[in-house]
Amino acid sequence: MSSRGLWADVRLRAAWVRQDWAAILREYRRAAGLSQRELEPYVGMPQPHISAIESGRRQVTSAEVMARITEGLQVPPELTSATSRPDLEEWGPPTELRDRIAHGHTTGRTDLRTADWIGEVLAQHRRAEDEIGGRDLWPVVRSQLDAVTRLIPGTAGPAADRLMLLAAEHAHWLSWVAAQQQRTGAALAWIDVAHGWAVDGGHADMASWAHRIRAFYSLSHGDPVRALRTAEAARFPVGLSPAAASAATHQAAIAAAALSERDRARRLADEAYQLALQVPDEVDRPGWLYWLDPARAQLQAADAAYACQDWEAAADGIRTALPELDGYPRDRAYYQGRLEQAERRAN
């Protein structure tokens, strides 16, 4: 694998953001399959020095050593800029991002290799959420979004639309992390930006998903009326894929259950489940819905049953699908807790 390809590894990227030089060396060696001695020519220092850094006996404080490691390990530009720009710690979306898109050209050509790379890395971030907190990766993803939006003013046609989708995916990720950090205003601002960019780029699935996330936020803050209204709006954009329609319909089912409209909730939950079964292949799903396989579809149906207080159906659905969550410890713990509660209430 190329050195740049190694930097798609999320644990390595998180170590870089923390500027933990011991972890950077360890994680790079792990990703590359290198021994300390094999790392010597990359960083221009002998194995005993590498060992001392990794063990904490020696601290990296010299700018010259930092530069040598950065250059030798071929750290990508979006990471080096992430550690040199303090404004990336701001939670809300800055005006400059919107300005770049608002002033996009109608003609132009852009080399999209950078965008392809950043899209690949974002996919890795999504899958690593159980392992590494989003807060640690926040500066990296903000820097990636900067890199994407800087390409847009010089791009036109389908290429520009593609960049708009990638920008919207980043804005959605930032919204989700902000919400987890209890930054409600920033979370809403980012998801609204994601929706606007998705609409501008003609991406129905992402526009629907942004509405679905907003509905989730409304429900989380005790407003099921607004949540149901927003989730219903997410269900009907023209050209919506079954995967995105399933996610929106499931959210509407949960909101309906919160309003005690249980018949409506059950009907919507069944529709969401049937839609999910139409997209068993990951390649047929939007990238941010990589998790929506038949097992997850069953868990969503169980969630809706739980919300409707159909305890036995909820317990049966969770019990059946729970083994499929072995690689997702946080999700497994959540559903294990729900299973125990459903079983208790069913008896």
Image (cartoon, grey):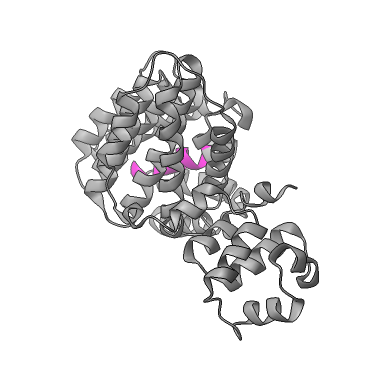
State which region is magenta. Answer: 297-308
Q: Residue furthest front?
A: 64
Count of all numbered marks drawn on residues in the image: 0
Q: Is residue 219 visible?
A: yes
Q: Nearer the viewer, residue 316 or 175?
A: 175
Quarter holding the C terminus? Answer: bottom left
Does residue 48 appear left or right of residue 295 in this picture? right
Residue 205 occupies quadrant: top left
Q: Is residue 215 visible?
A: no
Magenta part, dominant SS = helix
On screen, 68 above or below 127?
A: below
Q: Nearer the viewer, residue 209 or 122?
A: 122
Does residue 256 appear left or right of residue 105 in this picture? left
Q: Position of residue 251 (x, y in %)?
A: 36, 35
Q: Position of residue 111 (x, y in %)?
A: 56, 27
Residue 279 is one of the magenta-drawn residues? no
Query: Which residue is at 32% across, 51% downward?
Result: 178
Residue 300 is one of the magenta-drawn residues? yes
Q: Position of residue 190 (x, y in %)?
A: 30, 40
Q: Position of residue 9 (x, y in %)?
A: 62, 53
Q: Residue furthest bottom?
A: 57
Query: Which residue is at 40% across, 33% downward?
Result: 168
